[in-house]
Amino acid sequence: MDTEAQRVLHRYREMLIVRRGNLYSSTTITGNARPGFSSGQAIERIQSLLEESLPPSMGYEWSGMSLQEIESGSTTVFLFALGALFCYLFLAAQYESWTIPIAIVLAVPLGLLGAAGFTWVQKYDNNIYTQMGIVLLIGIVCKTAILLVEFAKQLHEEGLSIVDAALEAGRVRFRPILMTALTTAFGALPMVIATGAGAAARRALGTSVFGGMIVATVLGVFMIPIFYVAVQWTKEKARDVEKTFEEKIIHRHK
């Protein structure tokens, strides 16, 4: 049997199949988002078109990966916030302070800025692999910030002023920070330029990690000492105000 006859026979058999969903006659429609658009944007567009075009006697339901994305879409922001919260709690336990870890966690938005920027430049969508890279990036950026903040804290406890401790820590820790960041960034570079089967997933993951580390390192070298100075100065000012208030109360009682 030639190819044309096989094609006609296949179409005829498809016409004889009655597909049903929840006991209603149904059909299946599949598609992909255009390059530069996320699957979430495609889902929203399809929903708006169906709600405008379908008659009252017809309806639609999502299935497969689209259904899972819709059900889990609302938890993405929660997972990112939870990751940052756990980093903060672990650091608070390590330093026995509620304020010093703030200077470290404030470095996370720098990494997110780089991940979002590089993903946008490459015209990738915000898929699950990009989000995995962002979760990984939160931990890596915090680890890099620890190198500077911890040393600045030690210098300040040894007698240096807040500003001098931050400047000295930035100078001494510049090389370790650069080595850590470049090692991570260039380790993700093969995924950025990946080819072959599964390349799209590896590129999305690698681009978010690579871009986030580059931007977090360039900006973090200047911004993290500023974060430390601001947080430590606020902490000590609050302590002085509390001490002054307690002394006034004791003086009044006397």
Image: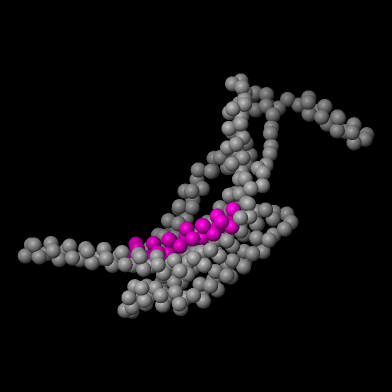
Q: Which residues are magenta?
A: 96-120
Would residue 174 appear left or right of 59 to someone viewing this image? left
Give x and y (percent) for residue 216: 51, 64
Looking at the image, is 24 positioned above or below residue 76?
Answer: above
**What sort of colour scheme is used for the picture?**
one colour
Res 38 → quadrant = top right
- Residue drawn at (61%, 55%), measured in percent from left and top? 121
Point out the residue furthest to the right here. Answer: 1
- Residue drawn at (61%, 43%), measured in percent from left and top? 39
Check if residue 114 falls in the magenta segment. Answer: yes
Depth order, front residue of 87/122: 122
Point out the residue furthest to the top here. Answer: 57
Looking at the image, is 174 positioned above or below residue 35?
Answer: below
Depth order, front residue of 156/85: 156
Looking at the image, is 94 positioned above or below residue 39?
Answer: below
Would residue 3 appear left or right of 222 to someone viewing this image? right
Check if residue 223 falls in the magenta segment. Answer: no
Please identify the dominant SS of the magenta region. helix
- Residue drawn at (8%, 62%), measured in percent from left and top? 252
Please identify the quadrant where the C terminus is shown: bottom left
Depth order, front residue of 20/215: 215
